[in-house]
Image (cartoon, rainbow, N blue to C red):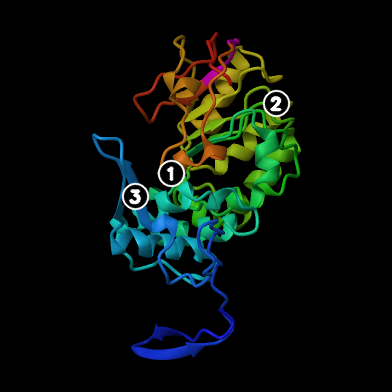
Amino acid sequence: MDNSTIYVRERGSLRRVSDIVLAQPKPALSCRRTNPFVPRKEHFIFTYNEEGSLRYTTKSLFDITLLFVVDNIHHVDSLIGFPEQIGDKLFVAAEENRVFLNPEISSKALQLFSDAYGGMVLESLCLRNRFPLLHERMDEIKTFHNLKSLDLFGCKLGDNHELFQHLTSTSLARSLIQLFIGSNSLSDAGLQRLTAPIRMMHKGLDCLQLLDISYNNISERALGYLTCLPKLANLDVSGTSLKLGTGLKTTMSNLLGLIYSEKPLDTFDHSRCKTEGWAEQVSMFKCRFDIDRSSGQICTSTKTNFDLCLGTLSCWNT
């Protein structure tokens, strides 16, 4: 393989590449050949006929090519321009070959797909109470710039987590509509830091419509930091130091245009939270459901058809 000559086409011209080393084939007990261009076991489909005899058929050239690309995904510069159908099949092949579980290449591979196919790769991500995964796979999570919903409830973010910068990035701000950051040891300072980009530079979280900040140590002062969110229509303040009363109702109405509702809101029901997109089949991102119930308080906006609740709510937590 070291003596192989490889050419790539760029801008209509062929260029010789001498520093690319293709992935070595998987070892096979029945074959001593190491050239990846000769037939390999992965290129065949083995079945049994009615008599019990072993038969094999050759995979299509397309499937063999997919396998070759997946084996060398770390050499791919871009998938932009390739049809969605090809991208989908390539993503499935990468998952089957456990590419996304390899920490050395997983973030680059996910970035390739995310750059080319956006929200089709992942538009909703549920990491509720899965803080070990969040901290272990931070680089992979940062590759998703087209999320519409992100659930980070119980992920121990605190007031200074590095993920705040990603949450307020320009690319993610264009798509993120729902954000769940309840039970994260947030204080007023954390919300101040999270909303600083949009308050000071008018960018970040400007499309946010639903925000869960329940079970955090926040006071009425923190509500002032949320006035910069122009589309905020649903707010969960369950389990905080905010106490239901005439004063809070007035503050919510005057500052945020939110009103009190007696009915619980389904929008904050965790049974609605799920991971959606091609990456939902990636084992580390699959949502887990261990149900627990608790009481809470919720708000939403007069500008929508949703009810707004600061009363008792049955929440579904994992």
User: What residue type is disc 3 on?
Assistant: Ile
Tags 1 and 2 in contact by the CB under 8 Å rule?
no
Q: Secondary structure at mark 3?
A: strand
User: What residue type is disc 1 on?
Assistant: Glu
Q: Nearer the viewer, residue 81 or 234?
A: 81
Residue marked by disc 1: 123
- The magenta region covers 293-298
Residue 186, above or below 18? above
Residue marked by disc 3: 45
Residue marked by disc 2: 216
Q: Nearer the viewer, residue 228 or 49?
A: 49
User: What residue type is disc 2 on?
Assistant: Asn
Position in image of residue 176 (x %, y %)? 48, 44
Q: Residues within 10 Å of mark 2 (few under 14, many from 20)?
A: many
Position in image of residue 183 (x %, y %)? 68, 26
Q: Determine whether, in the image, residue 222 is placed left or right of residue 306.
A: right
Q: Quadrant of the C terminus?
A: top right
Residue 275, above or below 308? below
Q: Residues within 10 Å of mark 3 (few under 14, many from 20)?
A: few
Between the C-alphas of marks 2 and 3, the distance is 55 Å
